[in-house]
Image (tube, helix red, strand yellow):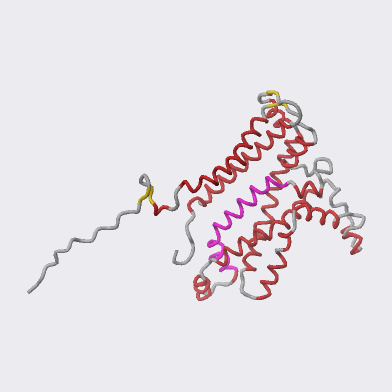
Amino acid sequence: MATTSTSAPARPPKPLTSGRGTRAADGPSVWMLAPAFAFFGLFAIVPLLGVALLSLTHWDGLGSPSFAGLENWTTVFTNPVTLNAMWLTLAMTVLTYVVQAPVSILLGVFMAGREKYRAVFSVLYFLPLLFSAAAIGIAFKALLDPNFGLSNAFDAPWLNRDWLGDPQLVFYVLVFVISWSFVPFHSLLYQAGVKQIPASMYEAAMLDGAGRARTFFSVTLPQIKYTVVTSSTLMIVGSLTYFDLVFVMTAGGPGNATRILPLDMYLTGFRSYQMGPASAIAVILVVVGLIVSLLLNRFSGADKMESQMEGA
């Protein structure tokens, strides 16, 4: 005799909720952001608002500020020294990125290998990360000195040049030193990104007969595209904060050949005691950095990142 089941069909589980309808499955409560948001507001937002207000005043660092309206902003956008600093900052951003990006990717991919000598090379190459920008600047300033630097040590005529005193040459010397100091950090990012690529993808490429170049462009580079976005954002936005190394090596000279915008802000505020225009320059740097970061994340799709881990 056939029997008929009388049990009710199983209902799908209810979504987990907490509080006023907030889904626990979506992650931690937004209230966990409160401490970080409080510190960020106190040490970032409040000073930024203060600098924005200061850009509308006349102030030499002493006494009371007086309201100046948009006069400081007009001064900034008509001052040839500041306009030249904007151009130098743009040129340094482009050149340092062009140098750092390909070198960092290739080094990161190379050092993600499993051979032992690559691990030793990685440790040696990451040594610049242990030194401060001031120490790197002092070291290169001594090495490039025409009187007792590398030119005398190796007795090479082509090294006997005033690398930091030639207005046509010093800017490119700074680009090289800045790139040399930051490439290890970005190589570390790419090395970590390459190590996350599933080995099965390389095995499939090997079975298809792909060479190293084809594997790099068809497997490695597409798989680290989000790392490229992250690294590019750090390179470009970080180039707006170059100050210490440039200040130690050249202090903006000779003339204004290396007076980039962050250095121009410092010299205007703390050497010329014009806090209003210096604050306007600081606001420009913040706004440009935010716009560049948002555009990179928007047009690269980084705001829609998904896990590329196998099985995730």
Query: How many numbered discs?
Result: 0
Q: Which residues are magenta?
A: 213-242
Which residue sits at x=66%, y=65%?
107
Asked if 4 appears above or below 19 in the picture, the reply is: below
Which residue sits at x=72%, y=36%?
83
**Considering the image in quadrants, where does the C terminus appear?**
bottom left
Asked if 169 appears above or below 308 in the picture, the reply is: above
**Considering the image in quadrants, where does the N terminus appear?**
bottom left
Position of residue 69 measured from the top left corner of the image (x, y, whole percent): 66, 24
Asked if 278 appears above or below 200 in the picture, the reply is: above
Is residue 241 shown in magenta?
yes
Dominant secondary structure of the residues highlighted in magenta in the image:
helix
283 and 165: which one is in front? 283
Is residue 11 shown in magenta?
no
Asked if 151 appears above or below 69 in the picture, the reply is: below
Position of residue 16 measured from the top left corner of the image (x, y, whole percent): 35, 53
Q: Quadrant of residue 115?
A: bottom right
Give the side of residue 235 with respect to residue 244, left or right. left
Residue sticking out furthest to the left: 1
290 and 48: which one is in front? 48
Q: Quadrant of residue 177?
A: bottom right
Which residue sits at x=78%, y=38%?
267
Position of residue 28 measured from the top left corner of the image (x, y, whole percent): 45, 52
223 and 193: which one is in front? 193
